[in-house]
Structure formats: C-alpha cells, structure tokens
Amino acid sequence: MENVEVHNGPNIRKAVVLLSGGMDSAVLLADTLAKGFAVTALSINYGQRHVKELVAAKTLAQYYQVEHEIISVPSGILENLKSSQSGHAEVPEGHYAEDSMKATVVPNRNMFLLSIAVARAIALEAHDVLYAAHAGDYAIYPDCRPEFVAAMQRAVEQCDWNPPELRAPFLRISKANIVALGLQLNVPFGETWTCYAGRRHSCGRCGTCCERLEAFHLAGAVDPLDYEDREFWKTAVQHES
Amino acid sequence: MENVEVHNGPNIRKAVVLLSGGMDSAVLLADTLAKGFAVTALSINYGQRHVKELVAAKTLAQYYQVEHEIISVPSGILENLKSSQSGHAEVPEGHYAEDSMKATVVPNRNMFLLSIAVARAIALEAHDVLYAAHAGDYAIYPDCRPEFVAAMQRAVEQCDWNPPELRAPFLRISKANIVALGLQLNVPFGETWTCYAGRRHSCGRCGTCCERLEAFHLAGAVDPLDYEDREFWKTAVQHES
C-alpha cells in the first residue's frame, strides 16, 4: 500500500529512462519502476541499422505502461565512416573483446543521447536521468566508462539552474548480473532486441549477441530469444570466466 | 607565405567552429581562421524563432570561404514552455541582466549543440571544437559559465579514444572586447544577426539587441546593423560601466 501512495503522491520522484529496446535498458526500466519512480521512457532514433530495437522499446513501454517519447534525429549527425551501427559497414562477427568490434562505435553517441535526455528531464521537471551503461562496455565504448559518466555527471550538474541528476546504476556491474536482476524482476527478455544484424531471428554471431548469450550463460539462464546460432559465442569468447 | 604553407600542409590543425550567425561566433570564426586553422563551420537549426540567424551564418561562411555544415534537428527536442527562443512565448524586452531574460533559456542547449559539434569533429578528424561562450552570458545562461565549460572539457576528453579539444576562447572576455577584436579582424558585423524578434530590422529592445548595442558603445564603435530603436538599451541597462 505504501508503494501505491508513493506512486500517486505529489512528491513522487520523476525519472527519464533512456530505453533503447535492448536488454540492459529494459532491466533498468523495470528496476527504476520497482524503486517507485514515475518514469518517462525516452527512445532516440538516430539512424540505427534497423528499427527492431525501436519496436522492442515500444513494446516494453506498453508492457510497463509508462509514458514513452520517441525522438528521431537526422542520421547524419552521428555519421562516421568507421561506424557499422548506422549502416555504413559490415557488422563484424565475434566477441566484443575483439578489436574489430570497435568498428561499431558511433562517435560521441552517449553525450548526444544524454544531452537530449537531460533537456527532456528539465522540461518535464524530472529529478533523474538514468542510462544503462555497464561494466562490460568499457573496453569498446569510451563513453560507457566510469570516467566518462563521472565527467558527464559534473557537466549535468552545471547545465541548468535546476539540473537533474545523471545516474548509471549498472556502471559497476556485469551484464550477467543485469540478466540476474532482470530475471528477479520478471523482465520480458523475449521482447527485447540486441542483435546488430536485424534479421528475423537474432544472429548469435555479432558482438552484442555473443555478449548477451554469454551473460545468460553466466547467470545460469536460457535467453528466450530465437537465435540463428546459439553456440558460436562459445568459440568467440576470449575471456570467459 | 608561411601562412599559405600552414594552410595547405599535411599538419594543418582542423577545427569545428559553432557558427550561429550571431556576432560572437562570427568573431570566433574570424579569429580561428586568423590563427591558421582549417575550419569547418557548423550551424545547428534546432527550431529557433526565425531563420535570419541561419541566413547570416550562410553569408558568413561564404564570406570566409569555409566549409559549412547545417544540421537541422526536430524542434521538439529542446522544447520547453519556459523558452521564448523557440517560439513558445513573447520575447521579453530589456537588458539581459533582468530576470525576465531567463525566459530565453533553452534547456541544456549547449550540451546538445556541443555533443553534435564533437561528434562531427571526431568524424572529420578535427583537433578542436570552438564555441563562443563569453563572460556576459553567465548571469542568464548556466551553460555558458566557466564551471559548465570546464566540466564539458573533461567530458569531451573522455568521450572518445581520440577526442578533440573543446575550447571557448572568449570565456573570460566581455562582449565589448569581442566587438573590439572583431573590428581589428574586419569582421563584417553588418552580416551578422543577433535580434530575437526576427523582423526586417533589429528591434533594439530585446535582451540580445540591448547587450549588443551596449557592447558596441563600450568598444567606442557604431553597430552597422539597422535598428528600429537604437536608444532603448540605454534606459534598460542596469550595470553600465
């Protein structure tokens, strides 16, 4: 009953959650709601390789019955010849730990996404902005590292006379622990989308698929998604514990 | 002759300059070129009240014969009921020092603009990103303060494996000193646009017009722009030196 009061009371804490449609942000959404926040989910279409992620974000927002804003921005903004997330190059196969996965880096993606989320939070008078950077991202994505998050937290503190707080609660935990938390919260993992290839079923061979399958394995669970290849990740993983 | 070599040599330092079409960024563009950088000017159309600023940016880029990118983003991204820069409210009259001018704040505008400029700089392999925040902006715009710029510099340092450097060379100088520098560099101030009202001639009564006319006065010069009212600023200024 106390939860209900928190949800409807005048002092409820509002949060903007960046929801990509992937499994990490889905668990973050569930976790934020479980903590009693009033959530606006925010998805940003910046010319990703496919729309399956955005469809997943819509489905998740409906499932959790939260406000959902989708903002489309011109794909050219984050264009980079080195990037394969926005359709310019082949999706490399293999585990994230491999150097080739650095080809998937979109330049300054997180500062851009966070700047929009913070702007929306100020406009919505939300107290918090949450995103799902996690410990598995560091090696590839410079803008998922604790150093980047800490610097952005300081910048957000200075960006407005009444700034929201930037939070990345998964920053120090592994993807396997995110899976474990999601299982505990009954997150509908089958409605999330991770694969870079964007075909009917997840490929199981791109970096994100390998990372996801490994995380479920480490969490002692089976990923409910359909995969073209559920075994490839085992040969690609170089640092399995 | 040395200048020509610097401009065409393989080691020329590339810079992205945020060019709004206002007088501050026009002087910044001239100053950056005078220092021998190869410049890409970047203008971002985020749903400002009128297009006269963007037309001025185009004219300035042509005048200086620099590459010019114009990126249009959906106006809703930075929407805020408190903002009058994107067409939601009346433009307040009077000097910036007045509280009413806080109505012109667009939430998190500079983090958003800088995130795009940094992304473009990474894609273009530019070494520097320059923007024209100056000492006169602090009281109104939280994201023009030295604290914000310093925090953003740290964030930019962490955002990429090969990040550009964020620079705000006018951060500690007044608008009057920017006018003085522009006069020295022969900046075509008549081609810049500052007024929030966006009519045929500058109104002379909005905060930016008052600030600009005061700056020219303090620099001992006459602004070549046409104004509806060249005298109003004198009654509105509360802190003239």
Image (cartoon, coloured by chain):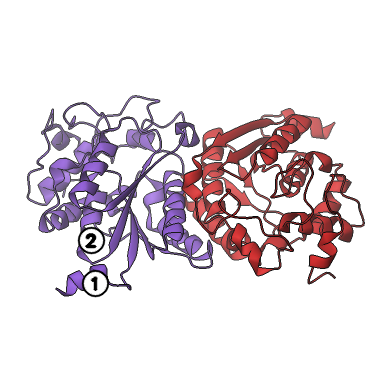
Chain colours: A red, B purple
Q: Return the residue at label 1.
A: B6
Q: CA distance from mark 1 to mark 2?
A: 11 Å
Chain containing the residue with disc 1: B
In percent of the image, x 73 and y 42: which residue is there? A29
Q: Is residue A1 visible?
A: yes
Q: Give the x, y percent position of residue B29.
A: 25, 55
In percent of the image, x 62 and y 61: which residue is there? A141
The foreground one among B211 and B161 is B161
Identify the element where label 2 is drawn: helix
Q: Is residue B209 above or below residue A215?
A: above
Q: Amino acid at mark 1?
A: Val
The foreground one among A46 and A26 is A46
Q: Give the x, y percent position of residue A10.
A: 66, 29
Q: Amino acid at mark 2?
A: Leu
In the image, is B126 to the left or to the right of A241? left
Q: Is residue B66 above or below residue A234?
A: above
In the image, is A175 to the left or to the right of A217? left
Chain containing the residue with disc 2: B
Q: Give the x, y percent position of residue A127.
A: 60, 42
**Circles 1 and 2: CB atoms closer than 8 Å:** no
In the image, is B192 to the left or to the right of B150? left
Residue B223 picture quarter: top left
Q: Is residue B205 above or below residue B149?
A: above
In percent of the image, x 72 and y 62: which residue is there? A136
Q: Looking at the figure, which quarter contains the N terminus of chain B?
A: bottom left
Q: Is residue B237 visible?
A: no
Identify the element where label 1 is drawn: helix
In percent of the image, x 15 and y 32: which residue is there? B232
What mark, if any, has residue B33 been given in the picture? 2
The foreground one among B31 and B132 is B31
* Mark 2 residue crowding within 10 angstroms, few (<14) / some (14–19) / many (20+): some
